[in-house]
Amino acid sequence: MSKLIENISFRVTIYDRGWRILSFWFEPEDICKVFQYYSDICRNLKEFDELLINLKEQKKLTQPTKDLGRNDSSLQVFGDKTILNCEYVSGYPPLEIKTEEVIDFFQLFRNWYADYEFGKIPGLIPKSRLDSWSCVPNEYVKPEYWEKVKKKREDGEEV
């Protein structure tokens, strides 16, 4: 891992209506706050992989050919340095950071996200698998339960 980012942890916050927010925290906190504006830049593994490919391609250039940010946040690679600019939405000044640090962060985030999506984090069931997984293997759950769940969904009730 990079020398800049330390004590990183990734989280899933699940709200009472089933919303899930993926987040992270690391030290130094001031840099973490800027990176948090980029937490939604990738919403699936394909987007993580595309971002990592683009970061590595842009690193080979001296001038960026595209902005890798999203919405009101800019992420531009100038060879070995990257500028993260979310000042418009955050009030934080643009952050200049080594491109390798950015790549390391998004690679770690991607690896954690893959573990989450494939159900490799004990105690967490990814939203994409809620219909086929439970806290016990579904083979131990009576079929009548699944019929009730199906009926509630068809009737528009929360399950």
Image: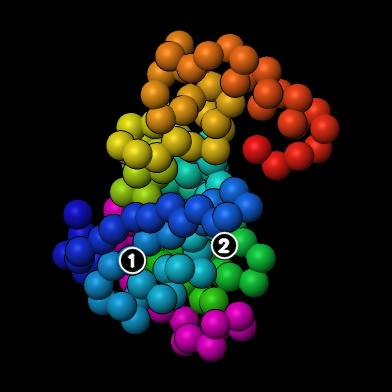
Q: Which of the pair 37/51 is nearer the observer?
A: 37
Q: Position of residue 27 (x, y in %)?
A: 25, 72
Q: Position of residue 62 (x, y in %)?
A: 43, 62
Q: Which of the pair 151/19 is nearer the observer?
A: 151
Please indicate whether residue 20 sits to the left or right of residue 28 in the image: right
At label 2, the amino acid type is Gly
Q: Report the residue at 34% width, 81% height from top.
A: 30
Please indicate whether residue 36 sits to the left or right of residue 88 in the image: left
Asked if residue 25 is positioned above or below residue 43 in the image, the reply reads below
* Magenta region, residue range: 87-106
Is residue 105 rendered magenta in the image?
Answer: yes
Q: Which of the pair 121/36 is nearer the observer?
A: 121
* Extreme-right residue of the structure: 155
Q: Which residue is mark 1?
A: 25
Q: Report the residue at 54% width, 22% height from top.
A: 132
Residue 59 visible in the displayed image: no
Asked if residue 130 is positioned above or below residue 137 in the image, the reply reads below
Q: Which residue is mark 2?
A: 69
Image mark for residue 134: none
Q: Nearer the viewer, mark 2 or mark 1?
A: 1
Q: Report the residue at 24% width, 66% height from top.
A: 5
Quadrant in the picture for residue 7: bottom left
Q: Position of residue 61 (x, y in %)?
A: 44, 56
Is residue 142 rendered magenta in the image?
Answer: no
Residue 123 visible in the displayed image: yes
Q: Which of the pair 30/19 is nearer the observer?
A: 19
Name the dominant secondary structure of the magenta segment: helix
Of labels 2 and 1, earlier in sequence is: 1
Quarter placement of the N terminus = bottom left
Quarter placement of the C terminus = top right
